[in-house]
């Protein structure tokens, strides 16, 4: 039975079981979880006090600029938004975010370093990484206890801002090359109260090198520890097309690997997973699947994952 077939079988079993919550997963695994459960019983970790005035300046949200997301339009194109908290896609993302949040809150069997840093990637281009990143970020931001920072870490093909209907803006790359002195200048608050965006910024030839730089290491460590209550989602490039995603993955507590149903083969997924072997938690999301009709949930096996179906018209992978 292929990876994808196992996925379909696993989540349909779950669904039949009436959406009971799976037991807490040990570190390194994230079990399939319930769909549609209330998201209010989350444990929060209090933010640590700022260590120095300069750090306060870098991370303080007060100077962040604001952007207005057109939530009606995003709802219309099938994204998760607070305007439709009970839509099919919102329910699907409840299932997807649950194990990630559980790990981020340290509620799984073993603690995971930097579990609040979550990278969304895939084997190949176009499998739905940005779509997944945005919906996941929006879904988590709709929880009572979580603030979310959505980082566009696909420096070669930034697509978070265009996907949200926003014009290009300066971002992370501009901070890394020193053209912007601190992160707060490029952080964007949104009209979804708990959702902020860090754009990729201007394209740069040395992107790969910069991602692997000491400055980037420091920035990521800072993000993970000083704002441990904040979930940080990185929309990243595909694993098999560039080296950036692999480098980025070494900093992440959790990696979500999007698998496009009907297109990406078992062998390709295995090859992609091999590039991020050292990452403590890897979760697969089966994307663009339609078996069982629009919006039906079904996922994959592989020991630590889940998936979901959507309204796109692709065939289920064999
Ligand atoms: N589940 C889905 N349902 C409907 N449309 C989807 C779904 N997933 C992705 N898409 C659409 O497919 C296209 C590609 O998705 P997306 O841009 O998220 O892929 P990507 O993996 O980020 O691509 P790239 O490798 O170029 O960054 C987009 O138009 C997106 O809106
Ligand atoms: Mg993308």
Image (spheres, helix red, strand yellow):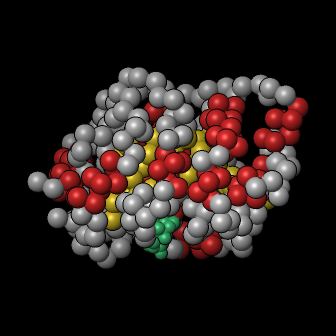
Find the residue positioned furthest to the left. Answer: 1
Residue 78 percent across, percent down from the top left: 48, 69
Residue 156 percent across, percent down from the top left: 58, 67
Residue 21 percent across, percent down from the top left: 32, 36
Q: Does 266 sit left or right of 33 as displayed? A: left
**Above/below status of 123 relative to 282:** below
Q: Looking at the figure, which quarter contains the C terminus?
A: bottom left
- Residue 172 visible, this angle: yes
- Residue 160 visible, this angle: no
Q: Looking at the figure, which quarter contains the N terminus?
A: bottom left
**Above/below status of 55 relative to 191:** above
At 65% from the left edge and 60% from the top edge, which residue is drawn? 206
Where on the picture, by quarter, is residue 34? top left
Find the residue positioned furthest to the bottom. Answer: 313
Q: Which of 75 and 195 is in front in this view?
A: 195
Residue 66 percent across, percent down from the top left: 79, 59
At 56% from the left edge and 52% from the top edge, which residue is drawn? 234
At 42% from the left edge and 57% from the top edge, which residue is drawn? 239
């Amino acid at each position: 039975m292929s990876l994808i077939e196992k996925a379909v079988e696993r989540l349909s079993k779950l669904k039949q079981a009436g959406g009971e919550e799976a037991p807490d997963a040990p570190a390194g695994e994230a079990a399939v979880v319930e769909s549609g459960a209330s998201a209010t019983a989350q444990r929060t970790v209090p933010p640590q006090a700022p260590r120095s005035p300069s750090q306060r300046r870098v991370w303080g949200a007060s100077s962040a600029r604001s952007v207005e997301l057109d939530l009606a339009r995003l709802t219309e194109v099938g994204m998760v938004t607070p305007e439709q908290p009970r839509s099919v896609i919102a329910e699907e993302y409840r299932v997807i975010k649950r194990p990630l949040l559980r790990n981020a809150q340290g509620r799984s069997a073993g603690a995971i370093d930097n579990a609040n840093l979550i990278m969304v990637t895939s084997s190949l281009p176009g499998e739905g990484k940005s779509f997944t990143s945005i919906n996941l970020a929006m879904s988590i931001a709709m929880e009572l206890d979580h603030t979310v920072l959505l980082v566009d870490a696909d420096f070669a093909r930034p697509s978070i801002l265009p996907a949200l209907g926003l014009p290009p803006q300066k971002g992370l790359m501009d901070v890394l090359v020193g053209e912007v002195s601190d992160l707060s200048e490029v952080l964007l608050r949104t009209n979804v109260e708990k959702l902020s965006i860090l754009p990729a910024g201007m394209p740069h030839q040395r992107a790969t090198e910069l991602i692997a730089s000491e400055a980037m290491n420091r920035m990521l460590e800072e993000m993970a520890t000083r704002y441990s209550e904040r979930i940080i989602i990185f929309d990243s490039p595909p694993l098999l097309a560039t080296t950036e995603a692999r480098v980025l993955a070494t900093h992440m507590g959790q990696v979500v690997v999007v698998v496009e149903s009907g297109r990406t083969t078992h062998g390709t997924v295995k090859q992609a997973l091999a590039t991020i072997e050292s990452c403590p938690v890897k979760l697969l999301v089966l994307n663009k699947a339609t078996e069982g009709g629009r919006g039906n949930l079904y996922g994959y096996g592989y020991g630590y994952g889940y998936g979901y179906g959507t309204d796109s018209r692709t065939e289920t992978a064999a």
